[in-house]
């Protein structure tokens, strides 16, 4: 009896020791000489794991959309270290230098986490693409030779990587930790680094990069993130061939045996625990492995798959179409470390998900370095796109400073037609806030907000002018750092006669929104014409009865009309021009507010005859009609 008890106790102690050592090894970075800043970041991320999920955005494009839609920045900003032109011409270097500057800004001034992937064009070809078979007829890279010292391929690999290492060195010199995601979608089969027949070659390529960057170049600011694809060619391709093609729906979910086979195949690409800090997977819609749209899923099947591929490693989502469902995640969903949205996505979903208590946003990160970072500020009321009918509006929001030095919040207004997201945010995280500040430097200073408990602020905006406007808040800290809020677009005391009225159009893009989205009052939804439809293209709204029409506003995306007319009709059949625009040039899109000689009409339409861009026809966020918009 006694003997068995001792054995049980010993086994329990052994389990405790093994458990403790597993935890310790999970925290020990792949690079034992990791700089303290990176180690601190990794420690913070590990401490967050299993609780809330750290939010991220994978590219610079969606960043302004997330800020202006939700009032919050993501905690992680993801970018690419590839220059997207002929290697290594001036344009290539200008692009990557710009990315380095943006990374410095994001880490040092905004205090956010930098994630970098590398869309590396094939090393042996100056015009090489990351995608296999591009340019057309390109020979695949022989990975066995690329791994063999003395070969041309081995030399090309290292020559190429040395340029990227120089840029990573700039970040290392500035002591910026990088969440480094090389060889992304490593087991997918569409990039040159994936060897589907001999996956061990791909795994060895990872180790070769690790050795070069860490051992040879001494880059000790990298947190190594392994990244699997949303599907693997081997497994899903095989199933599709068996089922008879890509359009045939497959039975779902996969059997345990199929999942095990998939894990076994994918594991062969994995370079080994000692070369990886975090394992991630990209989660685009793939019902075969059991995940759907972001709002219906927290990617449990993807989590199970990666638990098999990289047991014991913290798991993250490297890319997904929109941010995953925090409600499901909070109710016992998989404990993803972080999630990175590739697109901004549906505006209501963004507002819900990024403001969710289960998501960690930039303002909720602890200070990650010794220096000062910008304060955070957001406007909660009014919401973007609000139509207000009062002369006095109570504004409300939140502000904070992660260094505990918030000094105050100032409100500004710009009495101008609406700017679209691209125009409000710029297309580069470095210039988002300065550009907004500059914009509001030209606006009207409304005054200082009243500060309340827990960062809440309020402001009473009196004598609100009738017409179109933007409102922004700027927070400042005691060290002189400033930060601009989301910019909220409003109309005040003017009635949009087109709001919610029946709309129709000459065509509609299969991937874009219907005509009704241009008259729904939401500045995030839009009508897209079919890009292959011939000109003229038109969008019309039926006001329901004859009304006096004295002004029209069009908020465009960058796919706007260079030449177009505003037309009116009583019967929806015979039209006459009431305004014409020719040779319009506004690369970001923006909007046009046209005041007309008042006319009676029931139908109003945009008649577009010349698009501004050749890759898309026309895109209209909002088409609004008024009796009058005061000057
Ligand atoms: Ca600060
Ligand atoms: Ca809309």
Image (cartoon, rainbow, N blue to C red):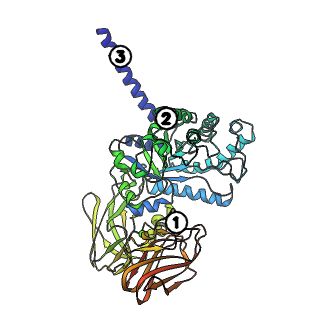
Residue 259: assigned label = 2
Comparing marks 3 and 1, which lies closer to the viewer?
A: 1
Q: Which residue is mark 1?
A: 509
How many marks the image carries: the answer is 3
Q: Residues within 10 Å of mark 1 (few under 14, many from 20)?
A: some
The percent coordinates of residue 290 (x first, y second) are: 45, 43
Q: CA distance from mark 3 to mark 1?
A: 68 Å
Q: State which image quarter holds ligand 2.
A: bottom left
Drawn side of residue 181 relative to residue 10, left or right: right
Q: CA distance from mark 3 to mark 2?
A: 36 Å
Q: CA distance from mark 2 to mark 1?
A: 38 Å
Say which of 336 and 236 sits in front. 236
Q: Is residue 166 above or below residue 307?
A: below
Q: Identify the mark nearer the N-term, 2 or 1.
A: 2
Q: Which residue is mark 3?
A: 10
In the rendered image, which quarter is residue 214 located in?
top right
């Amino acid at each position: 009896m006694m003997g068995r008890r001792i054995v049980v106790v010993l086994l329990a102690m052994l389990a405790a020791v093994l458990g403790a050592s597993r935890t310790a090894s999970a925290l020990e970075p792949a690079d034992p000489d990791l700089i303290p800043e990176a180690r601190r970041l990794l420690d913070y991320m590990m401490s967050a794991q299993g609780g809330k999920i750290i939010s991220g955005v994978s590219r610079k494009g969606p960043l302004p959309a997330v800020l202006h839609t939700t009032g919050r920045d993501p905690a992680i900003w993801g970018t690419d270290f590839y220059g997207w032109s002929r290697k290594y011409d001036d344009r290539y270097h200008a692009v990557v230098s710009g990315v380095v500057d943006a990374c410095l800004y994001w880490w040092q001034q905004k205090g956010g986490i930098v994630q970098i992937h590398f869309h590396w064009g094939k090393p042996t070809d100056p015009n090489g693409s990351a995608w296999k078979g591009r340019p057309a007829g390109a020979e695949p890279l022989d990975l066995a030779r690329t791994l063999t010292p003395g070969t041309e391929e081995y030399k090309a690999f290292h020559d190429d990587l040395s340029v990227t290492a120089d840029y990573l060195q700039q970040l290392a010199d500035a002591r910026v930790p990088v969440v480094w995601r090389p060889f992304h979608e490593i087991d997918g089969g569409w990039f040159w680094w994936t060897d589907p027949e001999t996956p061990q070659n791909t795994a060895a390529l990872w180790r070769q990069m690790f050795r070069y960057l860490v051992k040879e170049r001494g880059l000790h600011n990298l947190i190594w993130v392994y990244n699997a694809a949303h599907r693997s060619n081997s497994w899903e391709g095989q199933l599709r061939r068996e089922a008879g093609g890509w359009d045939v729906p497959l039975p779902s979910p996969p059997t345990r045996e199929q999942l095990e086979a998939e894990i076994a195949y994918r594991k062969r690409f994995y370079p080994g625990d000692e070369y990886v800090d975090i394992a991630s997977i990209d989660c685009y819609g793939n019902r075969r492995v059991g995940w759907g749209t972001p709002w219906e899923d927290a990617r449990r099947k993807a989590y199970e798959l990666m638990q098999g591929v990289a047991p014991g490693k913290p798991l993250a989502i490297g890319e997904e179409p929109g941010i995953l469902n925090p409600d499901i995640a909070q109710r016992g969903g998989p404990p993803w470390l972080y999630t990175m949205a590739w697109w901004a996505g549906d505006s209501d979903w963004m507002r819900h998900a990024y403001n969710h208590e289960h998501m960690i946003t930039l303002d909720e990160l602890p200070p990650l370095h010794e220096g000062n970072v910008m304060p955070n500020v957001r406007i909660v009321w009014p919401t973007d796109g609000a139509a207000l009918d009062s002369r006095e509006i109570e504004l409300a929001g939140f502000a904070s400073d992660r260094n505990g030095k918030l000094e105050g919040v100032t409100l500004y207004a710009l009495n101008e037609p609406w700017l679209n997201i691209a125009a409000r945010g710029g297309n580069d995280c470095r210039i988002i806030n300065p550009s907004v500040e500059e914009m509001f430097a030209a606006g009207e200073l409304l005054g200082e907000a009243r500060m309340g408990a827990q960062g809440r602020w309020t402001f009473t905006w009196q004598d609100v002018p009738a017409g179109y406007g933007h409102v922004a808040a700027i927070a400042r800290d005691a060290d002189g750092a400033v930060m601009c809020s989301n910019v909220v677009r409003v109309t005040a005391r003017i009635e949009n006669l087109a709001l919610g009225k029946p709309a129709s159009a000459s065509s509609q893009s299969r991937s874009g929104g219907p005509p009704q989205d241009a008259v729904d009052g939401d500045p995030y939804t839009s009508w897209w014409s079919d890009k292959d439809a011939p000109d003229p293209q038109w969008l019309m709204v039926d006001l329901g009865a004859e009304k006096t029409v004295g002004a029209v506003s069009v908020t465009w995306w960058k796919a706007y009309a260079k030449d177009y007319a505003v037309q009116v009709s009583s019967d929806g059949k015979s039209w006459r021009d009431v305004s014409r625009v020719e040779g319009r040039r506004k690369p970001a899109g923006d909007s046009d507010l046209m005041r007309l000689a008042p006319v009676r009409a029931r139908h109003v339409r945009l008649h577009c005859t010349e698009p501004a861009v050749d890759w898309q026809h026309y895109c209209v966020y909002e088409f609004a009609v008024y009796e009058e918009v005061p000057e």
